[in-house]
Amino acid sequence: MKELAISIRQEPLELVYNNEVKIRDIKDQNSIIELLNYLYVLLNIKKVNQLNALEESVLNGVILTSYRHFTINEIKHAFRLAVSGFLKIEMYQKLDSITFGKVMMAYNDHKLNKIKEHKKTIKPDNTMTIEEKEKIEELYKKNCIIPYFDKRKTATKPIINWQTYSIFNHFWNKKAFSLSKDEVKKYKEEAAKTLKNDLINKRTIENRIDINKPLNKKDLKMYASCIALYYKSDDILNHVRMEFEGWNDKL
């Protein structure tokens, strides 16, 4: 009955679950064990094929560090989507860190699409109330900005994707940081090098990619922006802490 009650709300499930307690804030670690037991049943994994104590401990650690910005119910939702074929990935009767990562990566893409679709149903800015604008801003913080800076704490290289590019634009428009001419040049050069390396790596999977073609300007701009965001994170966080009350305990 709870699932039905949630599903008839205006917001998609991906946003409804996001309002629940995140894994990083869970006090009772038995919740993770209960989550794994649920996934064993969902995937129809027999007792003999379940993880041993060491393997389960490793997976627990992965969940607590890499997926801490998700909620327990959201992860269950992700796996239900996966086994139902909505995430369009191969699923087997097994559960390990690789399978978990594959599902959550596909789910994150699915979630971003859901958020994008949901935004299209929202009234234009000129007809929005202050409360509606604040709600959208809060959703964007929860779904995009906070998870990015959460990952950035341990990231050893720029996180490059279109979501990160949108975060760059968000803070650039707020004038949360500045870029010198030398920095712009540096980030563009690093972007060109990184994009070319990514194309070379991708070519091993898709031979039809021609790395001798001129680099796509749109992709280059996205790469350079993500790289700039990576290096300017401290400046942005200083700006955020001064501007938004309550962010200190989240970032």
Image: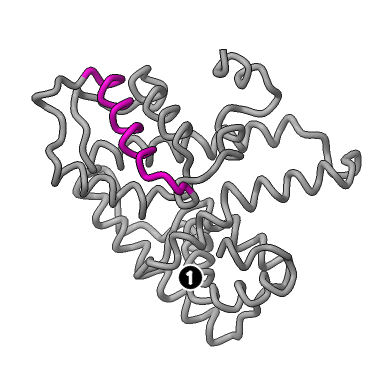
Residue 170 lies in the magenta-colored region: no
- Please name the residue shown 25% across and 42% down the image: 206
- Name which quarter of the figure residue 211 lies in: bottom left
Q: Which quadrant of the figure contains the N terminus?
A: top right
Residue 38 lies in the magenta-colored region: yes
With 98 as the anchor, is 144 left or right in this view? Answer: right
Q: Which residues are magenta?
A: 26-44
In front of the other: 107 or 169: 107
Q: Which quadrant of the figure contains the C terminus?
A: bottom right
- Please name the residue shown 81% across and 46% down the image: 133
* Tag 1: amino acid: Tyr
In front of the other: 120 or 139: 139
- What residue does disc 1 label? 230
- Please name the residue shown 35% across and 32% down the image: 35
In front of the other: 67 or 184: 67
With 5 as the anchor, is 109 left or right in this view? Answer: left
Above or below, 175 against 72 in this view is below
**Residue found at the far left of this picture:** 48
With 231 as the anchor, is 135 left or right in this view? Answer: right
With 212 as the anchor, is 207 left or right in this view? Answer: left
- Please name the residue shown 72% across and 50% down the image: 137
Q: Residues within 10 Å of mark 1 (few under 14, many from 20)?
A: many
Above or below, 51 against 154 in this view is above
- Name which quarter of the figure residue 215 lies in: bottom left
For label 1, the SS is helix
> x and y percent of residue 52 in the render?
12, 38
Magenta stretch, overall SS? helix
> x and y percent of residue 234 in the render?
55, 77
> x and y percent of residue 171 in the render?
66, 65
